[in-house]
């Protein structure tokens, strides 16, 4: 299992220490949440902050774009140093083209599904996706209530991926803690994103270790 702590829950006044903590921890990737205030009712970090943290991050930057028109910014994200770019299904009119452009730019390409979007809609695009990110909360904020229907959704996607014999990774984001991570991995998830459960823990590196040991 790949564990990607979400920096949205980190202490932004001490971002350098937070990244160094993650570098030294058992975390595999770092999850970055980019919001535009239009696709979601919140605004988070942008290029200057990502560029700065990419210089010290020793692990791949897994970037979740909560933006309308994410296709406008593909090479800019590559240039500031991110390794994977996931765009919302609900935000892309020409999703096929956008995924190809992300891969041509040299990054992993991911599709994110809001809680209401069924996995079955991916039938004709799955082969192009390195990652499918299932949102287990409505995107926009850390620390929200987990939507338990997400287990069933991950199971259905696992079945489709196995039947099609593709190598797409399943990522789950929102409200993940130790127990839910365990259940999600059993349901077929490959990547777990966790924000509050790691950064609000008394000992974040120890929480990372425990989630990795599930
Ligand atoms: C929500 C973000 C998540 C968020 C997860 O829009 O996509 O990555 O930071 O935070 P928790 O784990 O606290 O739900
Ligand atoms: Zn996210």
Image (cartoon, helix red, strand yellow):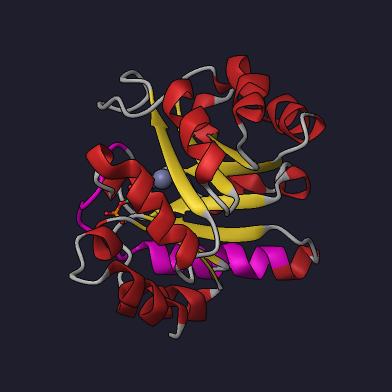
Which sits in the foreground, 165 or 49? 49
On screen, residue 193 versus residue 55, left or right, reads left
**Which range is magenta?**
140-161
Is residue 152 shown in magenta? yes
Image quarter for residue 75?
top right
Q: Quadrant of residue 203?
A: bottom left
Q: In this orientation, which residue lies closer to the viewer: 209 or 133?
A: 209
* Whole-percent x, y for residue 4 in the image: 47, 58
Which residue appears at 61% of the width and 68% of the height? 158
**Residue at the farthest bottom position:** 213
Q: Where does the image place residue 72, in percent across and percent down from the top left?
A: 60, 14
The residue under the point 30% across, 65% down is 148
Q: Residue at x 74, y 25 (%)?
A: 97
Residue 71 to residue 95: above or below = above
Picture residue at 80% right of the left edge, 66% below the top: 165
Q: Does residue 191 lie above or below 121 as drawn?
A: below
Q: Quadrant of the C terminus?
A: bottom left
**Magenta stretch encompasses residue 28:** no
- Vertical arrangement, residue 165 with respect to residue 86, above or below: below
Q: To which quarter of the image does residue 35 belong? A: top left
Q: Position of residue 107 (x, y in %)?
A: 71, 39
Picture coordinates of residue 194, whole percent (x, y): 36, 60
Is residue 93 visible to the viewer in this orientation of the structure? Answer: no
Judged left or right of residue 192, residue 80 is: right
Image side of residue 34 versus residue 204, left or right: right
Residue 90 visible, this angle: yes
Disc tally is: 0
Q: Nearer the viewer, residue 212 or 39?
A: 212
Q: Quarter holding the N terminus?
A: bottom right
Q: Is residue 17 above or below residue 74?
A: below
């Amino acid at each position: 299992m790949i564990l990607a702590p979400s920096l949205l829950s980190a202490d932004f006044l001490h971002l350098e220490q937070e990244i160094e903590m993650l570098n030294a921890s058992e975390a595999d990737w770092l999850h970055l949440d980019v919001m535009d205030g239009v696709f979601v009712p919140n605004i988070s970090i942008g290029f200057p902050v990502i560029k700065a943290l990419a210089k010290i991050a020793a692990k791949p930057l897994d970037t979740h774009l909560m933006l309308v028109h994410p296709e406008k910014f593909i090479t800019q994200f590559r240039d500031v140093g991110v390794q994977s770019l996931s765009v919302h299904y609900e935000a892309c009119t020409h999703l096929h083209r956008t995924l190809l452009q992300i891969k041509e730019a040299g990054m992993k390409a991911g599709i994110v599904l809001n809680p209401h979007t069924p996995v079955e809609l991916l039938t004709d695009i799955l082969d192009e996706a390195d990652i499918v990110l299932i949102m287990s909360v409505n995107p926009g904020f850390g620390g929200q209530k987990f939507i338990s229907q997400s287990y069933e959704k991950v199971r259905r996607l696992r079945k489709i991926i196995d039947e099609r014999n593709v190598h797409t990774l399943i990522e789950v984001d929102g409200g993940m803690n130790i127990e839910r991570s365990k259940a999600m991995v059993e349901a077929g998830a490959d990547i777990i994103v966790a924000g509050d459960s790691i950064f609000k823990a008394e000992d974040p590196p120890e929480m990372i270790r425990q989630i990795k040991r599930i």
